[in-house]
Amino acid sequence: MSDNPAASRLPRPIQYSEYLNLNQVLSAQTLESARYGNPAHDELLFVITHQAYELWFKQIVFELQSVIDIFDNSTVEDREMGQIIGWLSRITEIQVVLLQQINVIETMTPLDFLEFRDLLVPASGFQSIQFKQIEIMMGIKRDQRIPADRDFFLTRLSVDERQMLEGLERKPSLLELTDAWLARMPFLKFGVFEFWKEYELAVGKMLQSDRQIIAKNPAISDENRRWQMAAIEATQQRFESLLEKSRFDQLREKGEFRLSHRGFLAALFINLYRDEPMMYLPYRYLTLLLEIDQNFTNWRSRHALMVQRMLGRKIGTGGSSGHEYLNQTTEQNRVFLDLFALSTFLLPRSSLPKLPDELRRALGFHFAKTS
Amino acid sequence: MSDNPAASRLPRPIQYSEYLNLNQVLSAQTLESARYGNPAHDELLFVITHQAYELWFKQIVFELQSVIDIFDNSTVEDREMGQIIGWLSRITEIQVVLLQQINVIETMTPLDFLEFRDLLVPASGFQSIQFKQIEIMMGIKRDQRIPADRDFFLTRLSVDERQMLEGLERKPSLLELTDAWLARMPFLKFGVFEFWKEYELAVGKMLQSDRQIIAKNPAISDENRRWQMAAIEATQQRFESLLEKSRFDQLREKGEFRLSHRGFLAALFINLYRDEPMMYLPYRYLTLLLEIDQNFTNWRSRHALMVQRMLGRKIGTGGSSGHEYLNQTTEQNRVFLDLFALSTFLLPRSSLPKLPDELRRALGFHFAKTS
Amino acid sequence: MSDNPAASRLPRPIQYSEYLNLNQVLSAQTLESARYGNPAHDELLFVITHQAYELWFKQIVFELQSVIDIFDNSTVEDREMGQIIGWLSRITEIQVVLLQQINVIETMTPLDFLEFRDLLVPASGFQSIQFKQIEIMMGIKRDQRIPADRDFFLTRLSVDERQMLEGLERKPSLLELTDAWLARMPFLKFGVFEFWKEYELAVGKMLQSDRQIIAKNPAISDENRRWQMAAIEATQQRFESLLEKSRFDQLREKGEFRLSHRGFLAALFINLYRDEPMMYLPYRYLTLLLEIDQNFTNWRSRHALMVQRMLGRKIGTGGSSGHEYLNQTTEQNRVFLDLFALSTFLLPRSSLPKLPDELRRALGFHFAKTS
Amino acid sequence: MSDNPAASRLPRPIQYSEYLNLNQVLSAQTLESARYGNPAHDELLFVITHQAYELWFKQIVFELQSVIDIFDNSTVEDREMGQIIGWLSRITEIQVVLLQQINVIETMTPLDFLEFRDLLVPASGFQSIQFKQIEIMMGIKRDQRIPADRDFFLTRLSVDERQMLEGLERKPSLLELTDAWLARMPFLKFGVFEFWKEYELAVGKMLQSDRQIIAKNPAISDENRRWQMAAIEATQQRFESLLEKSRFDQLREKGEFRLSHRGFLAALFINLYRDEPMMYLPYRYLTLLLEIDQNFTNWRSRHALMVQRMLGRKIGTGGSSGHEYLNQTTEQNRVFLDLFALSTFLLPRSSLPKLPDELRRALGFHFAKTS
């Protein structure tokens, strides 16, 4: 906090506890076990941990909204990109806290939890509105959710809450905005250069060379050779479906991709040429989306283990155990899977098509040109 | 949270957000920058991080108080010791969160902080009453504090706050209660066995053997030999001042020890014979005190670096920079230094006096005897 | 490291780098990319990270073996239990390092990995013998493994390696030794007291009270009432299969339990009465087994995400993607699932049968009795 | 690891353990306690932890050297900056491992350490050559070290080791190379714009406004007003010494700054205008240097606490305790203190001089111009 004399410009002195509304925050811990005359030592921890989670969720919602606002309103300016990256990095640091807070809650043993667990019905962590907000803002769609999760919207929310979340579902998510931003990238057909033709040639050359080596290699068995040839065929298929829009769109309809064809290709280009100055910030941006997604996946999986440890195989009101439910959402509620899939289509730098000088210059800083 | 049908015993259904008073908690973020019409993006982070700190401080105060209550009211029962250890372990897990939250706040850059820093005068993190409570409960005394810290009590607190903290200062701290509990330990003169006599003999034998080897060793230089002999002398002095109460008390008056002579010896005994079943819980207890103290030291030092990074060399209202202040309290506000000093007086297991059978049996489980 | 003069007893001075065999350790990084004339910057990281993993695996194998040796040779003495707990806690701290090392390896981007990835065929992290050792020592059986994992033993190991691992598979694992140790616990029928009778009565009473409240509660819908009654029925079934050995054994054959009936009951007793001094160390022991298992599960799941990020959807030589394989073993290779299931059968302390005085005394310290 | 069929291009199949030289790495743990016939359980941990440290030190040395090579050989190209940032980020992730490894070593208790500590004389962690390399490469000079540390070079190194380190001391360090790179930055006098004039005016205006407000504010006491006026004076002094090269150089000679005047100003400019695209990478670079430095400071301070816990107040061969020595180097061996001091001179964005259009364009991407 500050002790800068310049602050005397400001008329209103403010004290620490007033500034932070500590009276309000520190009086918000009501223990059900105390209400029923049997205070359970560990309930305070339970309440405080969940409140800390909700505080951090509020911060994450705020940062995501700030990013969405920039993408939503206009073209993203270069100087805004640095800020966006700062806000997303912040989310990843908060996620480390979220993860560690599981270790804190696990200092409550299942037996201690039993002391007040039955008083909390039907409250459930699945009711966190803010966490649902985060999921929706990231890009999780209703029909992508597991059934228990979909029911939740109908049975466990107040009318206001449901309307708020459904309103959010109708707005463009970070996934969609990112896709549109990627698809808008102008440099993929810069000048006469057609990047993807070159890329296709490079892939073809690489695979042809592989085939020859396998055919001639005396050291491998026939079976192994057949298997390797089949693997090359599969690789080729994959590359072809990447480069032909119609095939890509078919796979996308089956759910194998979520980004549009143009968006996916732009993301791939950014990953391949991230060393070009102009690609650096977009590359960092995509990497952070991937990491935030990965951290939530990770947190869900840790959370599932923790719930199993606390409740064992007890069946919840939804008819399935909390552990099972959480384990399913771990894989189901991932958003930026396409960014994980990008690696499938990378080429070694030595095989990469060289960018034409004109394009390279365009991707550099203005200043460099004059020096 | 629970979905146990057994909970239907209870008349009052409760929902997640109601249980956690989320309306109250999530509406407690008032931004000064917004009040003055220039909302600063990072102020929300600043408020939420500090509120999260205060929530965790509340939990730590609660756990410390629970431990103090047990030590204060009566003899500590064996079955209470397990609980105490659970609560202290919880504090160490919370401290990992406290540390990681510094990484979160550091995602705010100094330039972003400047946007609202001057609006927060004279608020200061040093005003956290709960953190002062924790320090006092652990065992920090007013006259042990650095001057700026002592002034704080007179100048930065409301009358109520000061009275509350001064009341707390008059109550026995965890350090004092632990000392009294250690000093009460009955087994140090169990039966006819006088442990410390044996220990003294073992020390003497060890040092004598060292002297002979040094004297005879042809491989070392004369200067080295003189230095090593001096080091043995120093070691002997240290052991002597440990075993003679009057010399120990002199050193204690100079501030070199805080535990009483009996308390210190009992702590040493526990560390030496921690493999005996009855010593296990006391050993864990002392280790946790040391670790909690170490983690706060660590947090203070990280905090000092963070403040330096945010404010540079700016001078605070107290006339010293925040960094300097925090750096000084890092070393000054350590409490359980004696537990770090114990290692000075350990003997290798091979030199340890063997406990008489009668004592060993007494330190074991009752059950073992009958098996 | 030490500078104690007492050390002069020892004839052989030793220097830091000699002691640690640094010449040997730091010359063991051979880069394939350099061998083929195209040094890839990130290969050193790749090699060093894997070597660091193998060093820590060696340490974990050593600690597990030390624990197994104690359980294997004889009855476990009380004073050995403290040591075992220290060694297992150490493993959990090492596991935090293992997890963080994934963050380190992820600073290598997929594109950087491509620079040398193709040079490493057919090397594969699945070939880590020491990790297989750890799995086997913990208690993973061959027939429990997924097919790709079973094939591995036949196709990817040298004869020596396979013999070593198969020898290990024939020895009792930590799971089996723990089960035997639990089953030996004498206190379950101490004196005339038959604990499980009392426990059964307590369960019956609890469920009966639940039924009555549900039947009479006017606030819930008929459908909800039917569902809740069904849930109570399911709970009752579960408790019955716990208490009847024949039903338990049936479920065990289906793979729902791995511990023997006696072993499982003893583990439950320890969890219920962990506040008794004599139960404290066994309780810590069981908790640590659960945590080690949980940490490996967690590490596998993080590892799977990392591999997906590095390789995308590329198909491996085994015909499945690395990510899929690892994702499957995440759930499949858990060992101490029974300890997670224990929570299913806990009772609130208020419903717990009171232990007879005689038993309580037997579970206390000998010393307490005489005081 | 890879299972890409393309790899069949390569003639030499390689297995996991062969690739990693596991025979060599895993046979490098020689236990002194075993040599003397009294194997100490915890010595393996001690050896392996230190070996893991040395592996990571090797990686850090490699990354630092790679950065130094780029700065040393030529002007740093924009596309190299992204790589440099990747390598420095890697170091920060490794530092998290280094920190966590202290938690691992602390699972060895002082009593367990005693079992073999005396066998390790005169080996000492201070003898780690690679850590000294890291310090020197970062920018620590001999005459800046504390005496015990300087002596070390003369007494504890072999001739070869000393020559190697002294050779390194004569080469430019990362601090010096960064300073030179900063001082070369061309944009500070771009066109007719003279940035620092504008900056000085802005500072003057800000301080003048502060003075007026303090003078007029009726709410503050006379004493407080005097104090605040004095603080403004001090602030003004500080800014003046920043902007006048001769005064800056005087302070630099006293050790208050390490960067040159031009270097320091460029670093400040980068921090003030980091939102301009061209400043983003330099800003990230400077931030990473600060964080690496901060993490080492942090690690030293944790290390000092750990040694105190292990050895208590025992005096080392150098005549001072290990704890004291390490505590002193914690503050002494910081390198990039100037980057912490930058915050002293930041201005709120609202007071920042606006950059002329020509300069702003020059700091943007070339592409932006044509769009």
Image (cartoon, coloured by chain):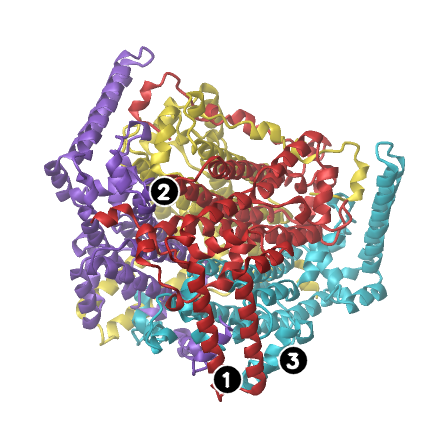
Chain colours: A purple, B cyan, C yellow, D red
For mark 3, what is the residue? B170
Which element carries disc 1, helix, strand or loop? helix
What whole-number distance in Å separates the C-alpha atoms at marks 2 and 3? 71 Å
- Give the residue number, with chain letter if any, for mark 1: D215
Residue C136 in the image, given as x and y percentages of width and height: 45, 34
Q: Which residue is mark 2?
A: A371
Question: Toward which corner of the image does residue B174 lie, by quadrant?
Answer: bottom right
Looking at the rendering, which quadrant does residue D26 occupy? Answer: top right
Secondary structure under tag 2 reads loop
Question: Both on one chain, marks 2 and 3?
Answer: no
Q: Nearer the viewer's eye, disc 1 or disc 2?
A: 2
Type of amino acid under label 3: Arg
Q: Amino acid at mark 2?
A: Ser
Q: Nearer the viewer, residue D67 or D231?
A: D231
Please name the residue shown 35% across and 78% down the image. Answer: B35
Residue A90 in sight in this render: yes
- Confirm whether residue B274 shows in the render: no
Query: Dot 2 surroundings within 10 Å: few (below 14), some, or many (20 or more)?
Result: few
> Residue A301, percent across and down?
35, 50
Residue in the picture at 56% in, 53% down: D298
- Check the image and name the residue furthest to the left: A246
Measured in 3D between alpha carbons, the distance from the residue under mark 1 to the one under mark 2, in whole angstroms, is 50 Å
The chain carrying label 1 is D
Q: Secondary structure at mark 3?
A: helix
Q: Residue at x 47, y 27 (%)?
A: C165
Query: Going by the image, does D348 lie left or right of D356?
Result: right
Quarter-wise, where is residue B320 in the image? bottom right
Q: Position of residue A226 (x, y in %)?
A: 24, 18
* Image height of B161 relative to D242, above or below: below
